[in-house]
Image: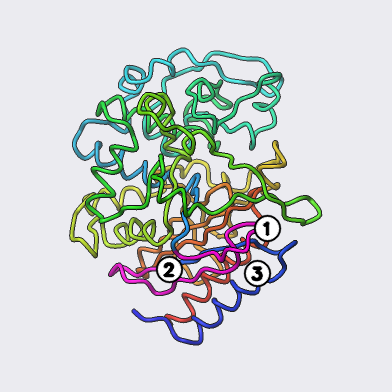
């Protein structure tokens, strides 16, 4: 599988052009695409390390990948499902591992709380039907949490113990569900999620630069965090996921939540090796290590929520406008579904029906097309989410890859 030089040049030019305006363009961006054989089809870094920086962005820079972490947590949980250490549909098991999830209340639209009618399963957590939300995507939850508020990125478990916004199993809502899936895994294995990732996913795949607690060399290459005003002006901002970057002692690290929903920092090129492994039915095409069975990967890519066909079009409001723009539709595909930790959709770029894809809050977007054997990621560090310029580059990257392969 080889990409045409014309497509390489076209995608490269689009990435470079997006970073030309230092004030209202993009500070810097990295894009990588990979084939089923684990070989890169495309890799390019454009722009600067961050707004106001003179350092060029490089393919060696480290990104906070936020919700791109979720698929890694999905792989980890499904390894334990294969081993029968976790069950997808046992609410009693989840309650025994996470007693915090017993006797939860459900927040109503009028602000009142009512008891949850039934327990939560691992499948619900992985499919975002357990009922949890995010305060930055849900105005009712945001307002309920006043005056203190919930900070889902604090590293404190108290911020994850929230009321539900739907009865378990009765709706799709994006939220801290997969953080709780990661906590289930930690308590079932008696390992931290980060240690589990390293031993059972990253080491077998030959990955050295993905971690929830970046090493000093990783932090030295960390891309800067940026914001954008409503008028389009870029500015430098503090890092949103701050605590994992400053904890140093083992005691401090041990008390910091390992966020299965948003906690990883990664080299985009190495992240693509995880995607290539999913393309290749759970076996690394570069190391030969099998981390999932083929049938497990297929299960992850099956729609878990056929009863909610319009979940992606229910709209997400900018409940915290510094973190997200309004999102009327999660993706412009005709057939939308949700697998085990990611969205499934066809689309206008040339991708196949049932392609897996998802995103990270500071505007990172990945896709994994198992039918055509191609995957990739575009990575930036710009808030708020759903930045139109990065979305446009994602379309340009995907479209360019498919047209260049055909």
- For the N terminus, the image quarter is bottom left
The scheme the figure's colours follow is rainbow
Q: Secondary structure at mark 1?
A: loop
Q: Quick check: 82 above or below 286?
A: above
Viewer-closest of 96 and 10? 10
Q: Bin the neighbour count of mark 2 within 10 Å (Cα to Cα): few under 14, some 14-19, many 20 and up.
A: many
Estimate the x, y position of residue 124 in percent, counting from the top left. Answer: 42, 33
Q: CA distance from mark 1 to mark 2?
A: 28 Å
Residue identifier under label 2: 33
Whether residue 287 is visible, yes or no, is yes
Estimate the x, y position of residue 161 in percent, counting from the top left. Answer: 51, 21
Q: Nearer the viewer, mark 2 or mark 3?
A: 3
Q: Bin the neighbour count of mark 3 within 10 Å (Cα to Cα): few under 14, some 14-19, many 20 and up.
A: many
The residue located at (58%, 53%) in the rendering is 381
Q: Nearer the viewer, mark 1 or mark 2?
A: 1
Q: Bin the neighbour count of mark 1 within 10 Å (Cα to Cα): few under 14, some 14-19, many 20 and up.
A: some
Viewer-closest of 338 and 244? 244
Q: Magenta span covers which residues?
A: 33-59
Mark earlier in primary sequence (1, 2) = 2
Left or right: residue 293 versus residue 245 is: left
Q: Is residue 128 magenta?
A: no
Q: Using the image, tell me which numbered label, if any, was put on residue 52.
A: 1
- For the C terminus, the image quarter is bottom left
Q: Using the image, tell me which numbered label, if any, was put on residue 179.
A: none
Estimate the x, y position of residue 47 in percent, counting from the top left. Answer: 60, 67
Q: Using the image, tell me which numbered label, if any, was put on residue 18.
A: 3
Left or right: residue 140 versus residue 352 is: right
Q: Is residue 57 magenta?
A: yes
The residue located at (32%, 17%) in the rendering is 96
Q: Nearer the viewer, mark 1 or mark 3?
A: 1
Q: Secondary structure at mark 2?
A: strand
The residue located at (61%, 21%) in the rendering is 107
């Amino acid at each position: 599988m080889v990409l045409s030089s014309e497509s390489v040049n076209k995608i490269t030019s689009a990435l470079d052009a997006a970073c030309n305006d230092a004030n209202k363009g993009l500070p810097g961006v990295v894009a990588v695409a990979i084939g089923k054989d684990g070989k890169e089809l495309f890799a390019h870094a454009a722009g600067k390390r961050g707004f106001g920086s003179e350092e060029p962005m490089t393919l060696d820079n480290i990104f906070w990948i936020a919700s791109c972490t979720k698929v890694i947590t999905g792989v980890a949980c499904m390894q334990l499902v294969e081993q029968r250490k976790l069950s997808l549909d046992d609410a009693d098991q989840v309650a025994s591992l996470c007693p915090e999830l017993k006797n939860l209340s459900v927040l109503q639209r009028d602000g009142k709380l009512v008891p949850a009618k039934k327990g939560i399963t691992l499948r619900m957590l992985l499919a975002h039907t357990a009922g949890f939300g995010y305060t930055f995507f849900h105005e009712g939850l945001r307002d309920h949490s006043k005056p203190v508020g919930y900070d889902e990125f604090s590293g404190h478990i108290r911020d994850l113990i929230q009321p539900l916004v739907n009865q378990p199993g009765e709706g799709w809502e994006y939220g801290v569900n997969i953080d709780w899936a990661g906590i289930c895994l930690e308590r079932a294995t008696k390992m931290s999620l980060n240690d589990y990732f390293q031993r059972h996913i990253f080491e077998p795949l030959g990955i050295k630069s993905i971690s929830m607690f970046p090493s000093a060399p990783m932090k030295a290459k960390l891309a800067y965090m940026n914001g954008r005003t409503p008028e389009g002006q870029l500015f430098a901002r503090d890092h949103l996921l701050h605590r994992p970057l400053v904890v140093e002692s083992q005691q401090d690290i041990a008390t910091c939540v390992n966020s299965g929903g948003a906690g990883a920092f990664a080299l985009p090129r190495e992240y693509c090796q995880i995607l290539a492994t999913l393309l290749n039915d759970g076996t690394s095409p570069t190391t030969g290590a099998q981390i999932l069975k083929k049938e497990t990967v297929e299960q992850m890519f099956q729609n878990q929520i056929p009863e909610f066909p319009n979940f992606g079009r229910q709209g997400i409001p900018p409940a915290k406008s510094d973190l997200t723009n309004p999102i009327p539709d999660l993706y412009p595909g005709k057939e939308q579904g949700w697998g085990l930790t990611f969205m499934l959709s066809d689309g206008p770029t040339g991708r196949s029906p049932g392609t897996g894809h998802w995103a990270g809050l500071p505007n990172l977007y990945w896709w994994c097309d198992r039918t055509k054997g191609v995957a990739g990621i575009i990575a930036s560090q710009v808030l708020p989410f759903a930045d139109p310029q990065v979305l446009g580059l994602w379309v340009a990257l995907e479209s360019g890859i498919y047209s260049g392969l055909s």
